Amino acid sequence: MKHSIKRQFALIFMAVMAGTVLLCILLNNLFLGQYYIRSKMDVILDAYQIISQGAKNNVYGTQEFTEQLNDVCSIYNITICTMDANSQINYKSINGGKELEAQLIGYIFGIYRGDEIKILSEGDGYVIQRIRSGDDEYLEMYGRLNSGISFIMRTPIESIRESAKIANRFFAYVGVIGVLAGGIIVWFVARRITRPILTLNRISEQMVHLDFEAKYRGDARNEIDLLGENINKLSASLEKSISELKTANNELQKDIERKEQIDEMRKEFLANVSHELKTPIALIQGYAEGLSEGVSDDPESTAFYCEVIMDEASKMNNMVKKLLTLNQLEFGNDMVSMERFDITALIKNYIQSASILTRQNGITVEFPDYPPVYVWADEYKTEEVFMNYFSNAVNHCGGERKITVSLEEADGRVRVSVFNTGEQIPEDAIPHLWEKFYKVDKARTREYGGSGVGLSIVKAIMESMNRDYGVENREKGVCFWFELEQ
């Protein structure tokens, strides 16, 4: 990545480290000398306070006081020499105090001058100065206490500039090593920090493409983990929302398709009904007008006219009833009531009730003596399906004029078949049999008063129960069938 956080972390840290080292070098050059002199002055002032306090407490010259001064001289590298009011030397430090004796006398009488003297501070009874003697440089304090004790103290001053150079060189070496080592450490630390960020980035990219399977898993319990948990919640929320939207969109699409289908069905229904009712209405109107105009005074002709009118009216009534039934089934207004009943008994009862019709048409009905066979289905609608199949078989029965009803059990299902002898159905017409108002032989259908709606009712009923149905040509006839669950 061009602007990697790891690289930025490392560069920022190295820049801060380098800046810190450079700042230390600059501060050394500017303030180290002053700080060093101030520290030395504080040491001398502390020694002065000890001498002054000893004089006030009248312990000056005692063994205890002498040991205290020895400790100060050894600890702070200070050389001290003191003289009482009678010009008697009372104390000389063992680290060069004898050399300061003549210098103290010179200060008292104003006859000593060093190579280079710079007064730094003056107080009540003392002077602090910076003095160079030959190649050596010292920080000195001399003066006289109120008790009459004169004193001089000296501490050597090392070369500040040389010390600053050494310190700066050391800082430079340490700084370079620190910057490099720190940069490497920060690189690995930043890599550890940015790894979960890269994981979150990958998850967000998957979310862009509507892939919500990836989830963030972290155990550091820091801000990044908190962000990861929130992204997981966001992912789950988006997945749920998109799922709901897709479901709603799918339902909406189904509703639109169903509306379009209903519109087409309505148009088709109106066209078919208009076409089917046109002929009987025309016949009824024609014969009614003939009767009204007294076309024939013959009672037999009048009776024939009336029979035609009643027959056509009956056909129209039957077709309207079937259309209403089909309309309820197709629009889902007729609920399916699943119950367990004996299909054998249902078929026997119907065949017995239709025996007069079959005898009038000279048809032989065969139905073996099956034991009770129980199925799960809507009993009323099942009887409607069988009635349509049986009526269709009666109307198209030919040849040997025989109808055979059979039951076959297999895989938890029962197939009910209604076979009738006669002419086979043309293969190209079979797929259209279940369409409303479709008639293979319109003249013959007209002859027995068929409406072309019965098999459409069968289709609607079987689909409402989610069961299979069909038709097939067989030798010497046609077989219609449907299946029910046991």
Image (cartoon, rainbow, N blue to C red):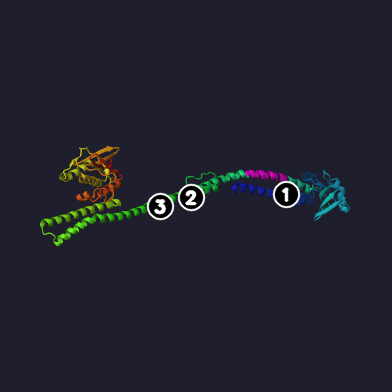
Question: Do the CB atoms of the residues marked 3 and 1 lie less than 8 Å apart?
Answer: no
Viewer-closest of 87 and 159? 159
Q: First in sequence: mark 1 or mark 2?
A: 1
In magenta segment, residue 93:
no
Q: How far from the left and from the top, in percent, is residue 284? A: 19, 57
* Residue placed under numbered mark 1 in the picture: 25
* Residue placed under numbered mark 2 in the picture: 234
Distance between the Cα atoms at labels 3 and 1? 71 Å
In magenta segment, residue 176:
yes
**The disc labelled 1 sits on which kind of residue?**
Ile
**The disc labelled 3 sits on which kind of residue?**
Asn
Give the secondary structure at mark 3. helix
Give the secondary structure at mark 1. helix
Distance between the Cα atoms at labels 2 and 3? 22 Å
Q: First in sequence: mark 2 or mark 3?
A: 2
Q: How far from the left and from the top, in percent, is residue 112? A: 88, 52
Q: Residue 90, can we see it?
A: yes
- 3 vs 1, front mark: 3
Viewer-closest of 130 and 6? 6
- Residue at 44% x, 50% y is 242
Distance between the Cα atoms at labels 1 and 2? 52 Å
* Span highlighted in magenta in the image: 170-185
Residue 249's disc number: 3
Q: How far from the left and from the top, in percent, is residue 465? A: 29, 46
Which quadrant would the C terminus be assigned to in this image?
top left
